Image: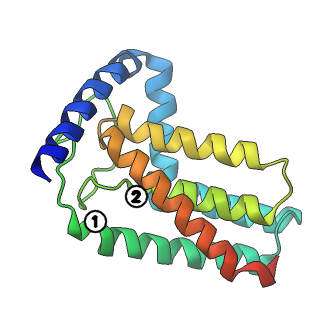
Amino acid sequence: MNSFVSRIDRLDERLDAWFEPLRNARLLVYVFNTASAVGDFGAIWHVIGVVGALTGALSWSQAVVLAALMGAESLFLNQGVKRFFRRTRPTAAGDDRFTVRRPLTSSFPSGHASSAFFACVVLSGWTSAGPTTAFFACAVVIATSRVVVRIHHVSDIVVGSVVGALLGTIALQFTSTIT
């Protein structure tokens, strides 16, 4: 098992180097700082739920259920799964190039990636095909932002994305009556 973890760490280090040029482009720093911030506590997804209810794209019950489901997903991931993995973050004190909140939980898996893909899957299951691409693009940018701002390793966001998508798929099975 230790050998496997060492290989993942080495792969993460190599992949992290690919992101370094993005960390020095002023516009991209702004984009990824912003994406990381709007992903805090799933804020963007809660806003999408409320706006969806206000515009009629979602029902109010869907907006409320989305908020409750996101709370449950966050609790499960941050207070459950992350406690099993005490992986350190890429930078202990953060990277001065970025103005992002410093999380208190461990690095693995990424909560931002998980909540983004969770919400993306749930919302895509509740709406027409039109907004699905936008939901997915938003989820990808939020997840990627966590590597760019040096809060997560690439493997953290990959696993977080998969976990979130799986949990979202399960949530859709239990919420089919409100769509």
The answer to whether 55 appears left or right of 121 in the picture is: right
Q: Residue at x 52, y 49 (%)?
A: 38
Of residues 38 and 73, which is closer to you in this image? 73
Does label 2 or label 1 sit earlier along the sequence?
A: 1
Classify 10 Å Cα crowding around label 1: few (below 14), some (14-19), many (20 and above): some
Q: Position of residue 128 (x, y in %)?
A: 86, 56
Of residues 101 and 91, which is closer to you in this image? 91
Residue identifier under label 2: 111
Q: Which of the numbered marks, if any, corresponds to residue 12?
A: none
In the depicted structure, whether residue 120 falls above or below residue 172: above
Looking at numbered disc 2 in the image, what kind of residue is underneath it?
Answer: Gly
In the depicted structure, whether residue 8 falls above or below residue 50: above
Residue identifier under label 1: 82
Q: Position of residue 115 (x, y in %)?
A: 50, 60
Q: Quadrant of residue 133?
A: top right
Looking at numbered disc 1 in the image, what kind of residue is underneath it?
Answer: Lys
